[in-house]
Amino acid sequence: MSLWRLSKLFIIVLAVLAVLAFVQVTLANQTLKSSIGPTSESEKALLWEDATKSFEIGNYNDAIRLFERLIHRYPSSPNHLKAHFYLGQAYLKTNNPTNALTPLKYFCEATGKTELGIQGKLLLSEAYLEVKKFHEAYLAAQEIIQLHKKHAFPSEFWMLALIHKAQAQTKLNHDYDATLTLEQARTELQENQSLLKGKAAWVELQLKVKKCEKLGNYHFTKLNESQTRSQIERRGTCLLESLILYLGVLQANEKKLALLSTAQMTASFQNYSKICMHPPLPAVLPTGKHTKKQINQYQKELIEVLTQDCKLQQEKARQLLTSLKDQIPPTMKAHIEDVIKKVGS
């Protein structure tokens, strides 16, 4: 093929590519226009109305979509700031705390030390707890507590901040400090504040279970038979006591708290069952010389005794849980029944 023909073919190819590129850009612009479109006062008002309505009736995914659209398309809207507040809450309601951080930070920075700002800071502290940023959660809660000393904010804000602080301290293994913080909150809790009482009971339950699970760490200490039996009994008794706190959580009638506390109690009793079924043997055997056969027999008998001790504690737990069912809202009874099934399993 001659050079002239090659040049002509090259020019034709370039022309075709240019046409294709133009078509692509045109289609992209049309798509962009159809997805974004021109802004309008009527759409701005409608977005806010539909978003808040979806939020109020619990359609949080729809609310998220609408609030996001309002924020991005109408930054000059008088509801732009409130949209961030609602958006952060909606993300928390749908178990997306990571996505809640950005709108809540924006809201807190814009509202500062006002009452609205404190509400936003409480939600931000909650989001930090959910994403396991416990130090940040502690700092956010502590800031609210300090502000409460200077401003006449509702006492509920202060109490919730104390509960968030105690939760952060618990996760940071500052258990003694967490206990003191909870005691401070309990001095102000009223009988009708069931949700706050439930949140406080949830933190206290976690602290109690941590104490229970320290009992029975036999590999740290040499124990004789009676000491080993005592440790297993004490751990079982400790878990029985924790069930009263579990009741306090369920009485709040809040789904997330119920799920968290039920998972905690189920795991704690399952761990107890493992110790019951496979108890560590005492490091100190009865005095005197024994044959290998005698030692094996001694171990077998000890396991049988310890297993019976554990079963007795588990039966007490089932009876207590059954008696507690009448003291909680009907919607919470399934959670107790779930724990009853798994005690001793």
Image (cartoon, rainbow, N blue to C red):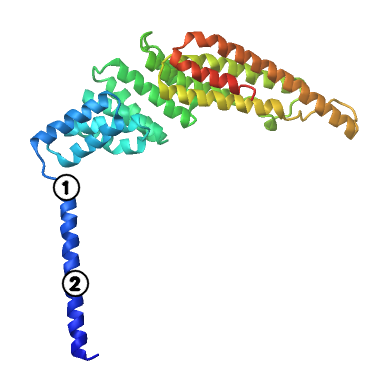
Instruction: Check disc 2: other Cα within 10 Å, few if <14, some if 14-19, many if 20+.
Output: few
Q: Which of 41 and 8 lies nearest the eye of the viewer?
A: 8
Residue 170 is left or right of residue 268, and the answer is left
Residue 240 is left or right of residue 140, and the answer is right
Residue for badge 2: 16
Three-letter amino acid code at the position of disc 2: Val
Q: Position of residue 230 (x, y in %)?
A: 70, 19
Q: Residue lying at the far bottom in this picture: please name it.
A: 2
Disc 2 is placed on an element classified as helix
Looking at marks 2 and 1 on the same chain, the residue that comes earlier in the sequence is marked by 2
Dividing the picture into quarters, in which one does residue 16 lie? bottom left
Residue for badge 1: 34
Q: Identify the residue at image location x=88%, y=34%.
A: 292
Q: Position of residue 211 (x, y in %)?
A: 57, 23
Residue 268 seen anywhere in this rendered image of the structure: yes
Q: Which of 252 and 4 lies nearest the eye of the viewer?
A: 4
Q: Position of residue 173 (x, y in %)?
A: 49, 30
Q: Which of 250 and 227 lies nearest the eye of the viewer?
A: 250
Instruction: Check disc 1: other Cα within 10 Å, few if <14, some if 14-19, many if 20+.
Output: few
